[in-house]
Amino acid sequence: MLLGYLFILPTMIGLLTFIVGPMIGSLGLSFYKWNVFRPAEFIGLENFQRLAGDARVFLSFKNTFILVIMTVTLLEALALALALSVYRLANRALSTFFRTAYFLPVLLSGAAVAVTLGYLFHQDFGVINYYLGYLGIQKIPWLTSSDTVLIAISLTTVWRNLGFTFIIYLGGLSTMPGEVLEAAEVDGATGWRRLRSVILPLLSPTILFASVTDIIKMLQFFDEPFIMTRGGPGDASRTVVMMMYESGFGNREFGYGSAIALALFAVIMIVTGIQFYLSRRWVFYG
Amino acid sequence: MAATLQTTDVKIASTTQPRGWIPTHLGRWLSMAFMIIIAILTLMPFLWVVSTSLRTPAQSFTLPPKWIPVDMEWSNYAQVFDEIPFWRQIGNSFLITLSVVAGQLITASLAGYAFARLRFPGRNILFWIVLATLMIPGQATIIPVFILISRILGLYDQLGALIVPGLATAFGTFLLRQYFMAIPDDFEEAAMIDGANQWQIFRLIYLPLASPGLAILAVLTFNGKWNDYFSPLIFMNTKELFPITLGIVDLQGYMGTGSISVVLAGIVLSTIPVIIIYILGQKYLVEGLMAGGVKG
């Protein structure tokens, strides 16, 4: 009996020290005004009042939402379409090739991807604008215009994460019961109908899993915008985590930074809660 | 397992009738074209990175882009070693990553085993706490963790700052618990009869049987930790102690003044270890991820 406690001891110490404790600490800190120069001072809800009226924080939430919506929509649609295509490939070598190719970017760090695609998106010297030129498209100021910067960052993130989401959908497809598909075929359901009424419902738990984890991941956007644009031009690509990083570590306002972090945490919980609530209408558990 | 299942499925279907969601041949060609286009878009940046890393700085921004590396300017690679303490930084990355991987394998296999197979009061509540920590994003706790690391543990700007917080893992504990749960009880009974004690049953019987789970945890943790940018950015200050992710962004120079060929050479060099680990663990990784998507 004692052995059980002994076995979980290292994990429990680690999680309590570095996750549970700091989470409570975050909550406590958000009621204080504290920077390196002055001792901590209790200010009640002032950080949250300031947060509610902070236009830059508001903008950073707006940017983050736009990024999440663009990125996750594109990611789920492309990954699902790719998984359906690769799944019905009969040629095994070809299917291995595609799987490996799509997964390769997942191995790169966000830093390496941000640096590389930053060059490719360059307005004058970038390869992307060069090839778009063939289609008669004028050079697009991808990273230097507030109209396009979020699109460029979103595409960069899709490029890096597509393979991961794709593998999860492929996994969902390959454990689908073969009999159900055959039964649908016998019943004369073909093509689009089979996809809509048989495959997608069977796949819906996987779709929920992938979209929930992707949205949580993307709400914490940091590496790509931080490296590619430093949040610019102006604040056009500043995300919530970047705001938190600046307040907490740039200005050393630990209390205010914690309040931003908590607001993000609350948003993550609410968005995930809504997704699970809505999922009761469309997710089918066989 | 998943892969075999998939191929038999494909065989059954292809002998009966074309297995299209879109019935016509047009659909097949469209989906093939789609797969090829995405593969090209995925692979082109890799080719561009490698070929540009081998060009002279003057040539690096040439348009139209030369996809075949003709210049073979290896000096870019040499310059990576001049610009940043590359070996130190790659060594730091290895030290940090391998310590965290080893630590997580130990702590998570012990805890996962206990939650799956040992009985003790409060087990369910404690496991529920572990699961709850999975939902807390790293960013929500980073400021208190920073204070803890720098003021209480005195680890600011030391490699320990990047290792110690990563030694315990809720995700890994959960993952390995599922593996240990799936192993039948018969093994334990047989070993008991043979006079094995609890530790031997864990170490010699169950741990080896859970090795696919350990491999998945090792590969995912290696990939995540090796590529981590956010925590080193916060905890480290001395260049000699940076992991290579920070070194790469450093190479770019402030406001992007570094030679891009040198930066890309650095990216190639820093990616090689991850690719090697991926090749070694590929079988487990892809199957594990696929299974994870289903159990969701």
Image (tube, coloured by chain):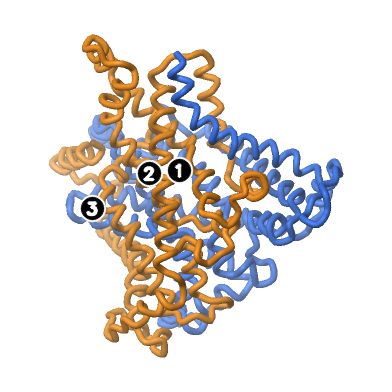
Chain colours: A blue, B orange
The chain that hosts pointer 1 is: A
The chain that hosts pointer 3 is: A
Mark 1 / mark 3, whichever is N-terminal: 3
Q: Using residue B104 as the reference point, say whether residue B43 is left or right of it.
A: left
Identify the secondary structure beneath mark 2: helix
Q: Quadrant of the N terminus of chain A?
A: top left
**Residue at screen point 55% across, 67% down:** A227
* Relative image position of residue A264 (x, y in whole percent): 66, 46
Identify the secondary structure beneath mark 3: helix
Q: Work out whether disc 1 and disc 3 sit on a shared chain.
A: yes
**Could you tell me the amino acid type at mark 3?**
Ser
Mark 2 / mark 1, whichever is N-terminal: 2
Gap between marks 3 and 2 measured at Cα: 15 Å
Above or below, B189 against B92 in this view is above
* Relative image position of residue A273 (x, y in whole percent): 60, 35
* Relative image position of residue B202 (x, y in whole percent): 32, 23
- In the picture, the disc for residue A95 is 3
**Could you tell me the amino acid type at mark 2?**
Ile
Gap between marks 1 and 3 measured at Cα: 21 Å
> Is there a contact, CB below 8 Å, between mark 1 and mark 3?
no
**Pointer 2 residue:** A168
**Pointer 1 residue:** A210
Gap between marks 2 and 1 measured at Cα: 7 Å
Q: Using residue A229 as the reference point, say whether residue B261 is left or right of it.
A: left
**Could you tell me the amino acid type at mark 1?**
Ala
Above or below, B13 against A51 in this view is above
| Circle 1 Cα neighbour tier, 10 Å, few/some/many (<14 / 14–19 / ≥20) | many
Asked if residue A77 shows in the view, the reply is: no
Mark 3 / mark 2, whichever is N-terminal: 3
**Residue at screen point 39% across, 35% down:** B106
